[in-house]
Image: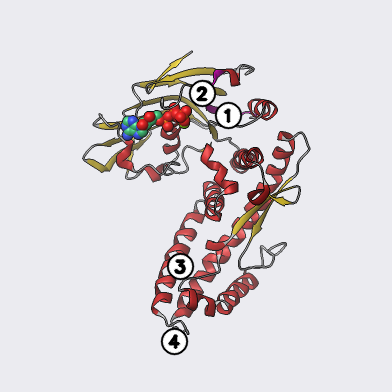
Amino acid sequence: MIIDRITADGYKNLEEIDIELDPKMNIICGENAQGKTNLVEAVWLCSGCRSFRGTRDKDFIGFTKDAARVGMDFTDSVRSQRIEFEVRKGSVKDKIVTLNGVKLPLLSKLFGSFRCVVFTPEDLDLIKGSPDNRRSFADLSIAQVKPSYVSALNKYNMILAQRNAALKSVGRDGSGAEFMDVWNEQLVKAGTYISVLRYAFCITLNNYTKLLYSSITDGKENLDLYYHSTVYDTLDGRLNDTEKLEAEYAEKLKSSAENDFRAGFTTVGVHRDDIGAYINGLSVRDFGSQGQARSAALSMKLAHARILKAEQGEYPVMLLDDVLSELDEKRRRFILNNIDDMQVIITCCDERSVTDMAEGKIFRMKNGRAEIK
Ligand SMILES: Nc1ncnc2c1ncn2[C@@H]1O[C@H](COP(=O)(O)OP(=O)(O)OP(=O)(O)O)[C@@H](O)[C@H]1O
Ligand SMILES: [Mg+2]
């Protein structure tokens, strides 16, 4: 997948952006607060995902502007397509979103048409942050190749919320909990399905990540990722045994009931699972250095791009926001030279960090305007 052209105006501080991208490497250089991340974010929104900075839709619009407009031409192995969206002041809910000229009701309906993978400094949380960062990463990655996963996840979350609300109305001793079986039954079905897909994803992710991390560290360090289920002791070799897995899930919910009554929420299940990352056997979250955590998170994102390529025959566009800043020279060079056939957009403050780049385009970002160097 390749972006041919990006236009943006009134999206945060972006002004009259109209750039044609290189099919491989694109560097956006500029001082702090010039709009580099805003541009990356505008591209990311075209994938139908929410802002990775958690920006609310009304804050898309530039402080002094009436509307935010973003347009993108992109090409995959089959055809060229165009995405446009516009958010106007006073009617933020009525966004105008079009794919190839056809109106869509929501930005999220773009999901699946244009695919990209983003790495930002906040992705350090993928390693150092709380488990929900890792669960979201797995969930989004799985959803990108298996759209039906989203409905299972939504269903699970809905039942979980209802079960938790019910738990609050039940006595701490469990009195009045007869109706719990109804929630359990539905939770088990969705929960087992999610466990199986996440576990399988983790194995694939680990295979790719391991290789990438080993190359980044010149073979000196070994990274391993494991799926930690709060329900199953192991899922190894059991992924097709749905009946048994569902029975085990149900049993776990039952045996945790007392804890749930006491806590007032559901204490086990896929909403509490985690992915552990270990370098040479030690937890990166607990013992890893900043650079190790960053390289591990980056390896996971690059691995994600490769999984998309393997599953769909097409690389996503790779968006690397400020990725070069905390890496040493060797790791930097590795990234610039190991992006396969992907199109990449990299932002950086210091042009010198990309001087050994073999090919591609460099854009300078200043006060929200981008110019080719
Ligand atoms: N709705 C908005 N309207 C106008 N400007 C905005 C809006 N939201 C954010 N900004 C401004 O956009 C500017 C640039 O933000 P951005 O995060 O893109 O900078 P950057 O070039 O990535 O900087 P850094 O190198 O520090 O990461 C900030 O100064 C911010 O105040
Ligand atoms: Mg930035």
CA neighbours of label 1 inside 10 A, class few (<14), some (14 to 19), many (20+): some
> Left or right: 169 with respect to 299?
left
Residue 177 figure quarter: bottom left
Expressed as whole percent of the image width and height from the top left, the position of residue 302 reads 62, 38
| Element carrying mark 4 | loop
The residue carrying pointer 4 sits among few (fewer than 14), some (14 to 19) or many (20 or more) residues within 10 Å by Cα, namely: few
Q: Earlier in the sequence, mark 3 or mark 4?
A: 3
Q: Earlier in the sequence, mark 3 or mark 1?
A: 3
- CA gap, disc 2 to disc 4? 61 Å
In terms of sequence position, does the residue under pointer 1 or pointer 4 come before the other? 4
- What is the x, y in percent for residue 81? 43, 31
Q: In the rendering, at what x and y percent does residue 94 appear?
A: 26, 43
Question: Badges 3 and 4: C-beta atoms under 8 Å apart?
Answer: no
Q: Which mark is residue 325?
A: 1
Is the C-beta separation of discs 1 and 2 under 8 Å?
yes
Mark number for residue 175? Answer: 4
Mark 1 vs mark 4: give the one in front.
1
Q: Residues within 10 Å of mark 2 (few under 14, many from 20)?
A: some
Who comes first in sequence, dot 1 or dot 2?
A: 1
What's the distance in space between the residues labelled 3 and 2, CA to CA? Answer: 44 Å
Q: Separation of disc 3 and disc 1 at Cα?
A: 41 Å
Q: On screen, 313 above or below 162? A: above
Question: What residue did someone put label 2 on?
Answer: 349
Front disc: 3 or 2:
2
Of pointers 2 and 4, the one earlier in the residue sequence: 4
Nearer to me, 89 or 193? 89
| Element assignment for label 2 | loop
The tag on residue 160 is: 3
Looking at numbered disc 3 in the image, what kind of residue is underneath it? Answer: Leu
Specify the amino acid type for callout 1.
Answer: Ser
Point out the stretch of residues depicted in magenta.
Answer: 340-351
